[in-house]
């Protein structure tokens, strides 16, 4: 009888401890919100190294958005962060979100029109930032709009829409 009481008390302590531990939320863990349009690739920084986020709209001169990648190039280190984009059939999911380290970046959408074709690039430029300006057809040189990202910051409305340059004036990346 004496041993039965000790075993029951021991089980009660164990169950109480397990209940307390399982009801506590972990600390120091930041939930990651996946986007429908982009998934990290091997060249993306690990979640521990992501300091900020850049978001915006994707454009493509068609009714659909082909699969490809969102690329952010740090203008100081020339390091490129890349997020895979799976594409859409009817223009839905035409936004992106990419995590980057603190710094200043230029961006592009590397669209793969078909398996045999060369990629087409959409940039965020001063000439054609949204793809709707009358200046998109201009022959002048394309200049990137640089995007500064601070720790914990989300920079929005960085649309990758300038597909309208010609072979003589593409933005340098």
Image (spheres, rainbow, N blue to C red):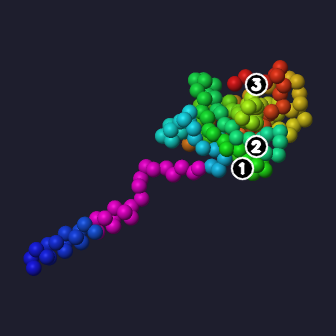
Badge 2 is on which residue?
65
Can the viewer see residue 89? yes
Q: Is residue 136 above or below residue 34?
A: above
How dense is the environment of label 2, judged by Cα within 10 Å: few (below 14), some, or many (20 and up)? Answer: many
Can the viewer see residue 55? no
First-in-chain label (2 vs 3): 2
Q: Where residue 89 sits: x, y (%)?
A: 76, 49
Quarter of the figure that contains the N terminus: bottom left
Q: Where residue 144 sits: x, y (%)?
A: 74, 28
Q: Which mark is residue 171?
A: 3
* Rendered residue at 87%/37% (across/down): 133
C-alpha separation, residue under disc 2 versus residue under disc 3: 21 Å
* Rendered residue at 57%/38% (across/down): 41
Q: Which mark is residue 7?
A: none
First-in-chain label (3 vs 1): 1
Q: Is residue 34 above or below residue 149?
A: below
C-alpha separation, residue under disc 2 versus residue under disc 1: 9 Å
Q: In the displayed orientation, state which residue is furthest to the bottom.
A: 1
Q: Where residue 161 sits: x, y (%)?
A: 78, 37
Residues in magenta, as a range: 16-34
Tell me whether circle 2 and circle 1 mark residues in contact (CB < 8 Å).
yes
* Rendered residue at 80%/33% (across/down): 163
C-alpha separation, residue under disc 3 versus residue under disc 1: 26 Å
First-in-chain label (2 vs 1): 2
């Amino acid at each position: 009888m004496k041993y039965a009481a000790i075993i029951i008390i021991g089980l009660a302590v164990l169950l109480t401890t397990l209940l307390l531990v399982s009801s506590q939320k972990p600390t120091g863990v930041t939930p990651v919100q996946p986007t429908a349009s982009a998934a990290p690739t091997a060249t993306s920084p690990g979640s521990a190294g992501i300091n900020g986020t850049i978001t915006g709209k994707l454009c493509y001169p068609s009714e659909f958005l082909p699969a490809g990648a969102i690329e952010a190039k740090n203008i100081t280190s020339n390091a490129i962060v890349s997020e895979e984009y799976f594409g859409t059939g009817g223009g839905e999911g035409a936004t992106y979100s990419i995590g980057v380290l603190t710094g200043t970046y230029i961006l592009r959408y590397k669209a793969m029109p078909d398996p045999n074709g060369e990629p087409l690039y959409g940039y965020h430029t001063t000439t054609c930032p949204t793809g709707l300006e009358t200046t998109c057809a201009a022959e002048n040189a394309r200049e990137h709009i640089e995007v500064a990202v601070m720790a914990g910051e989300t920079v929005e409305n960085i649309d990758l829409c300038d597909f309208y340059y010609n072979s003589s004036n593409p933005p340098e990346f």
